Image (cartoon, rainbow, N blue to C red):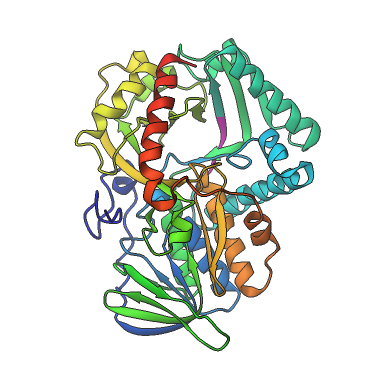
Amino acid sequence: MNLLFANDRRGEYPPSLYAEQNPALPPFPPLRGDARADVAVVGAGYTGLSAALTLARAGRSVVLLEAQRVGFGASGRNGGQMGSGQRLEVDELERMAGRTAARRLWDMAEEAKALTRALAAEGGVTVHPGIAHAARNPREVRHAHENAERLARDYGYALIEPLDAAGLRALVKSPLYAGGDLDRGAGHLDPLALALGLARLAAAAGVRIHEGAHVHAISHARRAGEATIVQTGAGRVICDHVILAANGYLGHLDMGVAARVMPINNFVVATEPLGARADDILGENIAVHDTRFVVNYWRLSEDRRLVFGGGESLGYRFPRDIAAKVRRPLEQVYPQLKGVRITHGWGGTLAITMNRMPYFARPAPNCLSASGFSGHGVALANLSGKLMAQAVIGQSEGFETMAALPLPAFPGGAALRWPLLVAGMGWYSLRDRLGV
């Protein structure tokens, strides 16, 4: 199954609130015939757009190939939460890579937030401060508070406020949670607006963007002096380097990456504008995510709709009624919204890895790949694109730091990763329902 086309119409954005509220850019032309470039970038989400923009501003000629529309994938559909740190918390990173490497990874994640804020400002996109982390039981609350203390003490990050049950309830007006924390250094934004802003910046910098340019195959250069050829249905790019930035939509372009990066689906809805009722949902204009394995996440839009993500799917096809699937966790979190009108429901494909850290690799001597952001990509994807661009230019320290992280393949590789995930999702979904 080709996830680029399995659940969406060709050349159209999904029926999301974001697509309704952000006027689409004029279509970029498909690729016809041969094009020559220093670098071909595959995928026009945050990673690819950031890489292309960085390279163009450094004087490289860049062709950016997108099978659908710019920002079509997870970059234009996600919950809009720009979290702090890596996907793993620092205690887990310290166990995995040691204290020195964990600190370097934390600093890179702070760089990712700063980069994303700068790109958003340049693209005219507002970033609102604050993400609350809602814990379900006292054990999770203790862990959240210990993590906040560790970050302040060992990492110099004092922007997380621990919250008891009453403190969290004042912000997140749900009966489900026992406490948590509020990270005022994190933030939230309109994700499609950011992708479209990046596309405008990239095009202005000289990037040749082609939409409707589905990459079917890549012939990698194997020795000095050879070119890499990136083949689409109606043309090809002859280039010196290629950057893979397709994340959950990579398909079979590189099976080594596919063995370590698995696409999964997630679902989001938007309610009708809530007006004054929004004050009974959130005490401030913050975003929230909780501690379920199949995480619930939410925020209010500019017109005071609840944008809520949640609900698992054990197949690659989107469910027929996304609104009904997400309504159940929404009304569990906010029983006061029982029966609220849902105006938009959409699905999207992201990508995860075995240990939830992104996978950086060199699939061929002149090819770089970064993917598998595991639901934590709003900031890290932008940084990943920049790191790959810098590596092409010859400044590879940041890329190599990420590539050095141990990241196992899924058992059975690309062939068996999905049935094993289905089994695991069933187990963790049961734990979520039992509250453990």
410 in relation to 237, above or below = above
Q: Main secondary structure of the magenta part?
A: strand
360 in relation to 266, above or below = below
Relative side of 84 to 280, left or right: right
Relative side of 45 to 118, left or right: left
What residue lies at 60% left-to-right and 72% top-to-bottom? 392
Q: x%, y% of residue 150? A: 75, 29
Residues drawn in magenta: 127-131
The residue nearer to you, when weighing 200 against 370, is 370
Relative side of 318 to 59, left or right: left
Q: x%, y% of residue 324? A: 24, 27
Does any portion of residue 274 appear in the rendered image? yes
Q: x%, y% of residue 356? A: 54, 42
The residue nearer to you, when weighing 33 against 17, is 33
What residue lies at 64% left-to-right and 23% top-to-bottom? 144
Residue lying farthest to the left in this orientation: 320
